[in-house]
Image (cartoon, rainbow, N blue to C red):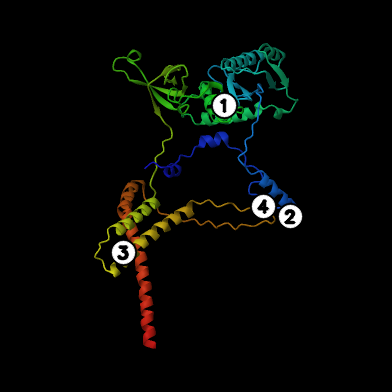
Amino acid sequence: MLTSKAVRKHYPESDETTKGHMRRIKSGVRSTKEQVQEPEEVSEALTRLAELRKKHRDIYVQVKEASDIIYTDQTGKFPVTSSRGHKYIMVLVEIDGNYIAMEPMRSKETAEMIEVYTTIIERMKKQGVHPKKQFLDNEAPKEYLETIEKQGLEWELVPPHNHRRNIAEKGIQTAKGHITANVIGVDATFPLREWHRLLPQIEMTLNMLRPSNIRPTISAHSYMYGIHDYNRMPLAPLGCATQCFAGPDQRRSFGAHSMDSWYIGTSPEHYRCQRVFMKETNAERVTDTIVFKHKNITNPQVSAADAITAAAHNLADTIKTNMPKDLNKVNFEELERLSKIFQEAAEKVNENNARQTRVQTPRVATHQQVEVATTPRVDIEVDEPPPLMNRYMTRQQKRLQGSITTDVMLMVMEIRGKEMNMHARQRQYQIDYVNRS
């Protein structure tokens, strides 16, 4: 059954997210520094302040004016030059909507920067967003600044050698992490020279995850383009290997009905259509019929511990629900004890499994050096069977292995035998005690 617990247990670990968004651990987390105790006067003042800050169903209204400010900057060189000669990416951050816009660039020459910048500004103005002021790096060409003025914007340069004042630097960090995660997650056969074709959907999904500043209840993408209709424009993993449908007019007689391709994004101009890059023609195509060949498929597997636990629970439930009514007290107690043994066996397996999977926190010596004795390594000679016998020995081992239910019954019999021996010892001790007295 598909439950939230099962999904969390078998959720696939995504290396792409870690490789794209992993950051260094922050300082001060689980610090071992001794906490300085505050004076009683300070603690009382903090307590009174916390009482004053409690909510009392008051309503506060704050009017926030739109700033109409944008920040722009360019990324470093991309590792692979695209098929159209793109090497860089211009990043624009719109403050009110918290929107990050991206456009590929062939070079950092003035003419190329003006062309790409004009493309982004016209795209924003088409959606009704008209910025009034722009902040950019101190190394802006004169022609570029004149283009900003022609667009009706004021401009301001950040201080020299102080890139932290440019908010686009943080936008570049966020955009590069999202781009890296998507590029790493593409199919192994996807041509990386076509990375520029992935940027439209990368920009779309990135801004869907960012809340708007002027309206925090909606995403940055909704602020710019409105609510996204997933039924009209479905999304899929970028760079995924696909099979694109080939119609009768696109194939020969007795030809294949599909062609190898890669998914590069949804098509906003069409209804329920996808953009794919064809392997045979090296061209982009829009199609409404497509089959995805996902790279990662989650296939939950039942471990030996889970199977033993389930078998023990099933046996215990069977004993409880199928007890005849005409049992005497002794037999009823024996069945109850057997059911309890099954439950204890299942809990014991769960505890052992959890103990093996638990990761221990590394201990770090802060004040003194501790010498750790290494375990001596001993060479053990093992007689390995010849390659031709591997299959025979595997089958023989399979024959010797019992079923899971049999293993549980053997475990229960062993526990039951130990319990009976203990009762026998107690009984013999009582008899000896009576004889002595």
Name the quadrant containing residue 1: top left
- Give the x, y percent position of residue 164: 70, 30
What's the distance in space between the residues labelled 3 and 2, CA to CA? 62 Å
Q: At x 37% / y 69%, what residue is drawn?
A: 419
Residue linked to disc 2 = 40
Nearest the viewer among 83 and 158 is: 158
Q: Is residue 61 above or below residue 147?
A: below
Mark 4: secondary structure: loop
Residue linked to disc 4 = 32
Nearest the viewer among 11 and 127 is: 127
Mark 3: secondary structure: helix
What's the distance in space between the residues labelled 4 and 1, CA to CA? 40 Å
For the C terminus, which image quadrant? bottom left
Left or right, 220 with reference to 46: left
Q: Amino acid under label 1?
A: Ala
Discs 4/2, front: 2
Nearest the viewer among 173 and 88 is: 173
Left or right, 299 with reference to 364: left
Q: Amino acid under label 4?
A: Thr
Discs 1/2, front: 2
Tell me if residue 139 can be seen.
no
- Give the x, y percent position of residue 420: 35, 71
Residue linked to disc 1 = 220
Instruction: Work out whether mark 4 precedes mark 2 in sequence or the reverse, and give the earlier one.
Output: 4
Mark 2: secondary structure: helix
Tell me the crowding category of disc 3: few under 14, some 14 to 19, or many 20 or more residues within 10 angstroms, Cα based.
some
What's the distance in space between the residues labelled 4 and 2, CA to CA? 24 Å
Tell me the crowding category of disc 2: few under 14, some 14 to 19, or many 20 or more residues within 10 angstroms, Cα based.
few
- Give the x, y percent position of residue 103: 58, 20
Q: Amino acid under label 3?
A: Leu
Question: Is the Cβ of the residue at disc 3 closer than 8 Å to that at disc 2?
Answer: no
